[in-house]
Image (cartoon, helix red, strand yellow):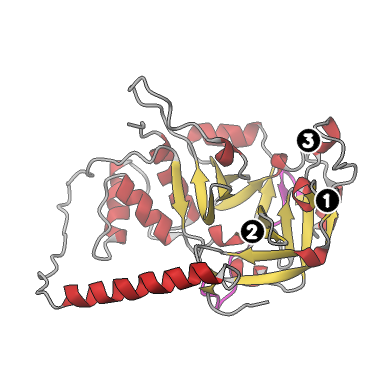
Amino acid sequence: MTTGDIRPDQTRSPGRRGGSLILACGLALLLQACAAKQQPEPQTFEPAAGEPAGEARALEGRFQADAHEYPWSALGRVNLAGTGFCNGIMVGPRQVLTQAQCLYSKRDGRWWRPQELHFITAYQQDRFLADSKVTRFFTAPGYSPGGGINLANLTNNWAVLILSEPIGERSGWLGMQWENATLKAAEARGSAVFLRAGYRLDWPHSISLHFGCKAGDTGLINLCEATPNELALPPFVISDGALHVVADYYVRTAGSGALASRAALTQQGNLMGRPSPPTAGSPIRRNPTASTAAFLEALGYDTAEQNLSDAMRRYLRDNNLPPRSTADIAFLASLIAKARNTPSR
C-alpha cells in the first residue's frame, strides 16, 4: 500500500510505460528545440469593468474532472484481480461504497475474495494518491447474485469494502443523501445540482462527469443525452455546499440501517454520514479550483495569467450572484447549472 504523494501508477503494463518514456523523450527534444527560438513577451489581460463574457463553448453536458482535488479525490476504482474494475466511493477513512454486483464474478460463479480486490483513490492517467488492500466486505442483506433482475436486487445493490489502510484521511470522503421533494425543489431553484461521475468503461483512466444540457436546434442527435457508459456511473448531488452520493442508486429506501451499520455511518434526516475533506498535509487540493477554471473558460471567462479570481468576479456580476472569494464546490455547482443551460451545437 502506498500513501505518499501522488505518484505514478505501477500497476500498468511495462510495455505501456516504455512507450510513455519514449514519447516523453521525444517531447523533451522538441521542447529544447522550441526553447532556442525567441519567445514573445507575455501580455497580461486586464478586463474592463463592464466587459461581457466571451462566447460560451458548449460542453454537451460532460466534463473531465481533476481527480487530484476534493471532492473528486474521494472517487476511486475497485480493481478486480486484473480482470476489470468497478467504481468505488470513499465514505469513511477505510470504508468504500460500491455495488454488490461488482463483487461477484459471473465467469467463476462466486464472490471475489477480499485478497483479490485492490482499491486506488484519486486515480488519474498514470498517477494516484493512495491504494489499499481489502480486508473484508459486506453486501446488502437479501442481495442474490444469481437472482437476476428482481426487486430485492434492484433495491439493495450495495456493498461496503473495509480497507486495510485509512487512505480516506488523505483523499477525503463523501456523505450520502436520498432524493426527496425538498431536494428536487432545491434543484428547480438552482441551489442543488445532480450529476453522474466516475470512471467509465470506455474512459477508464480519468473521472468523467455527466450533467446534461439543453439540446440544440440542429435537428441532429441530442448530444446532451447520457451514453450507456455514462448512465452506469454513480449519481451525485451538490447541495448545502457539499457533494453527496445519491443513495437511491444503492438503496431505494431511506430505512437502510444495515448499510449505516456496515459503513459505520449515522443517519439523520435525509442524510447519511458527513463528508470530510482531506486532512492537512495531503497533496490533494481541498477545493475544485481546476474544475472551476475549466468551467469558467468554457462559459467564456478568461482565466489565463492566474486570473481566476477576476473571472469569478465577472461571472458573479454577470449572473447577479452575491460576491464570493473561494472556488469551492458550491461555486462549481453554479457553473455546472449554467453550463447545463448552454445548448449543444
Q: Amino acid at mark 2?
A: Arg
Task: State the CA–CA distance, disc 2 to disc 1.
Answer: 21 Å
Residue 278 spot, x, y in % from top left: 58, 69
- Give the number of the mark in front: 2 or 1: 1
Asked if the stretch drawn in magenta spans residue 85, the answer is no
Q: Who's the residue at 49% across and 34% down the image? A: 189
Task: State the CA–CA distance, disc 2 to disc 3.
Answer: 22 Å
User: Which of the marked residues, 3 or 1, is nearer the chain's N terminus?
Assistant: 1
Q: Which residues are magenta?
A: 268-285
Question: Which numbered marker is on residue 154?
Answer: 3
Q: Which residue is mark 1?
A: 108
Task: State the CA–CA distance, disc 3 to disc 1.
Answer: 22 Å
User: Which of the marked residues, 2 or 3, is nearer the chain's N terminus?
Assistant: 2
Q: Outermost residue, right direction?
A: 142
Q: Which residue is mark 2?
A: 77
Q: Does the magenta stretch mainly form a helix, a strand or a loop?
A: loop
Q: Secondary structure at mark 3?
A: helix
